[in-house]
Image (cartoon, rainbow, N blue to C red):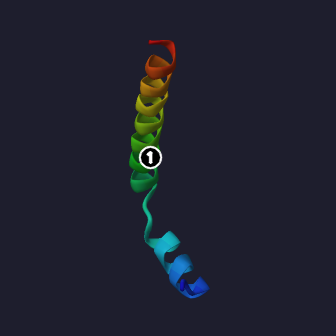
Amino acid sequence: MWRRADLESDAAQLKPLHLIAASLIGAVLFIVVLLVVVREVVG
């Protein structure tokens, strides 16, 4: 599977901008999924 060295080199190549973009995308997806689930339950 994954070697520790590969993971560490990948983490070293990540820029803060990538982390911010990924977290924003994740947050938006999370909110959209929550809204869909709530509408299905309530509606």
Of all residues, the one furthest to the top in this rendering is 43
The relative height of residue 23 versus residue 27 in the rendered view (above or below) is: below
Q: In this view, does 28 lie to the left or right of 9?
A: left
- Of residues 5 and 43, which is closer to you in this image? 43
Image x and y of residue 17, in percent: 40, 51
Residue 43: quadrant of the picture:
top left
Q: In this view, does 4 lie to the left or right of 25?
A: right
Q: Residues within 10 Å of mark 1 (few under 14, many from 20)?
A: few
Identify the residue position indicated by label 1 in the image. 20
Residue appearing at x 48%, y 27% in the figure: 37
- Of residues 36 and 23, which is closer to you in this image? 36
Image x and y of residue 16, in percent: 46, 54
- Of residues 41 and 38, which is closer to you in this image? 41
Report the number of discs: 1
The relative height of residue 6 versus residue 16 in the rendered view (above or below) is: below
Disc 1, SS: helix
Residue appearing at x 49%, y 28% in the figure: 34
Residue appearing at x 44%, y 46% in the figure: 20
Residue appearing at x 44%, y 33% in the figure: 33
Q: In which quarter of the image is the N terminus?
A: bottom right
Image x and y of residue 9, in percent: 50, 80
Residue type at numbered disc 1? Ile
Image x and y of residue 28, in percent: 41, 34
